[in-house]
Image (cartoon, rainbow, N blue to C red):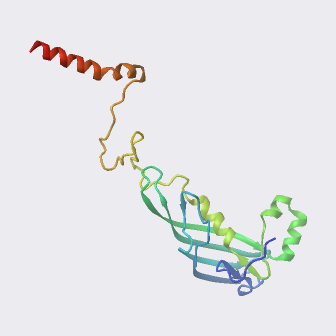
Amino acid sequence: MERVDPASPFVLDAKDVGRRPGSMSEVRRTVEAPQDFGTDVLAVAPGQPMELEVRLESVHEGILVTGTVDATATGACVRCLDDLDLPVDVRFQELFVWPDRARHHREVATEQDADEELRIEDDTIDLDPVIRDAVLPALPFQPVCREDCPGLCPECGFRLEDDPDHEHEQIDPRWAALDALRPLAEGAGGDDEEKRT
């Protein structure tokens, strides 16, 4: 298991709560978003502020961590490609277990449960994976600047917001060969007109 960096702003000190069930502690802090905090389409940019409000409550097995994270994700509308800012306001709740309780859980839990278990390591609680698991699935897979965004013209890429009546003449492909002859026919008709005058 990767060791927790105690200097990380996402790491909390479990000693502030202690092991007596019922004891509580609250933490508010502003942290900078880490790298790769989002998707290719929408993400909280590295270094952008994230507001954390966290309550730590000591329970028999460990520490129950409940909190919220507020941030702003940036990206582009998938329809019109305009830049967009999307507020992120997500709640999370996870149980971090003490090392001795973790050993007991491993004896009675399935292997999958043990892998998913969050542990208090060196009296610290690392919120980074918890916040990622809460925020990233909450980001829309296909963000739009607004629900009725008309997007871009599929023919030429024109921004339809600027002209909702924008359209192209659609020619049935079965008639495309005849349409290619239209300039010739129009030219021939013009010659006949000149001859008659």
Q: Residue furthest right?
A: 107
Classify 159 as above or below 69: above
Left or right? Give the position of 149 relative to 90: left
Left or right? Give the position of 188 relative to 33: left
Left or right? Give the position of 3 relative to 187: right
Classify 156 as above or below 105: above
Residue nearer the viewer, 70 or 108: 70
Classify 195 as above or below 42: above
- Residue 140 falls in image quadrant: bottom right
- Percent position of residue 51, x then y: 55, 76
Residue nearer the viewer, 90 or 167: 167
- Percent position of residue 134, x then y: 63, 64
The quadrant of the picture occupied by the C terminus is top left
Residue nearer the viewer, 96 or 145: 145
Residue nearer the viewer, 157 or 30: 157
Classify 165 as above or below 91: above
- Percent position of residue 4, x then y: 75, 77
Q: Residue at x 77, y 63 (%)?
A: 116
- Residue 11 falls in image quadrant: bottom right
- Percent position of residue 174, x then y: 42, 20
The quadrant of the picture occupied by the N terminus is bottom right
Q: Residue at x 36, y 29 (%)?
A: 170
